[in-house]
Image: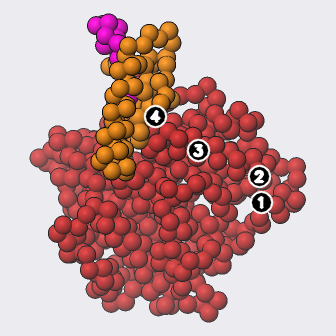
Chain colours: A orange, B red
Amino acid sequence: MGREIERVAGIPVVQIATIIPIMLTVGANRIVPGIAIPHPTGDPDLGPERDRAVREELVMRSLGALATDVAEQTVFEK
Amino acid sequence: MRLELRKVRIRDVRWGDVTKVEGGTLFIDKKEAIAVVAEETRFAHVDLELARPGESVRIIPVKDAIEPRVKIGDDGAPTGYFPGFCAPMDRAGEGCTLVLDGAAVVTCGPIVAFQEGFIDMQGPGAVYTPFSATQNVILIVEPIDGLDPHAYERILREAGLKLAVHIAARCAENGVPEADELTVYEKGTAHEEGKKFPDLPKVVYVCMNITQGLLHDTYLYGSDIRPALPTLVHPNEVLDGAMVSGNCVSACDKNTTWHHVHNPIVASLYARHGTEINFLGVIPTQESTIMDGKLRAARMNLSIALELGAQGAIISEEGYGNPDSDLCLNAKYFEQAGIRTVVVSDEAAGTDGASQGLADTTPEMIAFVSTGNVNEMLEVPAMARVIGCPEAIANLSGGSDESLRPDGSMFVEMQSITASTTEIGYSRVGCEWV
C-alpha cells in the first residue's frame, strides 16, 4: 500500500514496522523501526508517561523521515 | 542417555468402571477422570467425550493434543510426566516411559477464539490431521465467570497434561498389558558421540517455537521460553516430555504437545545417528516479537551450533508471518558461517497458491521443504455429532462468518484444521517417492 501511495499519488510514505527485514522485502522506502509486533507504536511496559515519550519520539522521527530525500531503501534508526 | 518407550497399542476407547487397558481397548473411569480435572476450582464445568477414528464427529475448537504417557520407576510404579508440570523437576529422556500409543487427550474450549482449530474424525478433513487416527478423549471445560484469558489458557493447558498423565498412571497401576512395541533411544553426550564418530558430518536441529506472549508460548521443563535464550537439549529430552505447547496460534502449524514427543525430525536424525551423521542435539529457540529478540535468538542459535562444531542444520519453523523472518535469519547466519541448512516450513501462498509463500526471503535460504499451503480451500461435509461449538468456525483463523452452512458443512482454509501443515513435518499426506 505504501509503495502504491508513493507511485500513484506521489505522496512520500513512512512505514513504522517492527520486522524490518519484511519491510525491506516488500519494498518500503522509508522505514522507522517499531517497538514490538503487539505494540509497534509504543511501549506500554514503560508506564503511561514514558510510553507517551516513546510515541512522540517515533512520530517526530517519522516526520523527519518524510522530509528526507532518499535514493534507496532507508531505515531511520533512533 | 537411554530412553525406553513401552508402547501399548490402543485400538479403541470406551467408558469403564476402572481406567485401564485391556485387549487393546482403553477404558476410562469418566467420573474419576472428571474429578481429577475438577480439582482446579476455576473451572465452572468439566466434561469428557470420546471420539474414535472413522466416526462422524467434528471436534471444535481444539487447543492442544497430548499423548497419555507416564514415567515408570524401578518398582514399576508411575511417577508422573512432563517435568515442571506433572512430575518433579528432573531430567526427561532417561529410564522407562509407558506410552498409550494411538490414544490422545484433546483439549477443547475457546480461548483466543481465532487461534484454535478443528478435527474431523472422518471425511476429507480427516486426511489432514493426525488426530483423526487417534482414539480421542476430549476434555471440554468452561471457566468461571470473569477468569482472564491468561489464567484460562494456563488451567486448560495444565488440565490437559494432568488428564493425560492421570490416564496413563491409572493404566500402569491397573495392570497394563505387555508393551506391543519397545522403542529405545540411546545416545551419549555430544562430546562422547563426537569421539565415537569423528568422521561423520555433525548435524544439529534448530526447533523454532512460537514464543510471542499473549497466549502464544512454548514451555521447556515448565518454564516459558519466551523470555529465555536459546538452549541445547539432548534429543531424548524432547522425545520424553520436556517440551509442552502453550500456544494458541493458527491451528494448522502449531506443534501440539503430542507433536513434540513425536517430532519426526528428531526421530529421523536419531535413526541416522552413527551411520550417516552425528546428531549433536536439539536447540529449542524463540520467535520473538521484537527485532532485537529475533536477531539475538538467531545469533545465539549459531553460537551454540558453532561451539558444537556443527556442519549441517535442520531448521523447523512454528507458525507463519513474522516467524518467517526468524527462519530467514537462522538460514542466513548459519549459511554465512559455513553450516549447510535445510529449512522446513509451510507457506501462506493465497487460496490460489500464487502468492509468495513466506513473508520474508533471503538468498541464503537455499534448501526448503514445504509442508503445504495454509490457505488451500477445503470442503468438509457435516458430521453427525459436533463436540464443542460448531459456530466457532466463524472466529477461527481460516474460517469466516460464511464458512458454516445451514446443513452443517463447511468451506474453510486448510489452516483451520489442527496440525494440517505442521512444520516439523508430521503429516498423513506427502509426496510420492519416485
Front of the two marks 4 and 2: 4
Whether tag 2 and tag 1 are in contact, CB under 8 A, the answer is yes
Tag 3 residue: B296
Task: Check disc 3: other Cα within 10 Å, few if <14, some if 14-19, many if 20+.
Answer: some
Question: In the figure, A4 relative to B35: above or below?
Answer: above
Marks 2 and 1: same chain? yes
Would residue B46 appear left or right of B321 to someone viewing this image?
left
Q: Residue at left 41%, top 77%?
A: B162
Q: Chain of mark 1?
A: B
Q: Which residue is mark 2?
A: B308
Q: Which residues are magenta?
A: A5-16
Q: Is residue B96 left or right of residue B149?
A: right
Counting residues from the N terminus, which is met first, the one under dot 1 or under dot 3? Answer: 1
Q: Position of residue B306 (x, y in %)?
A: 75, 46
Q: Nearer the viewer, mark 2 or mark 3?
A: 3
Structural distance between the alpha carbons of marks 4 and 2? 30 Å
Residue B190 tag number: 1
Specify few, some or many for label 1: CA neighbours under 10 Å numbering under 14, 14-19, or 20 or more.
Answer: some
Amino acid under disc 4: Ile
SS for dot 4: loop
Q: Is residue A37 visible?
A: yes
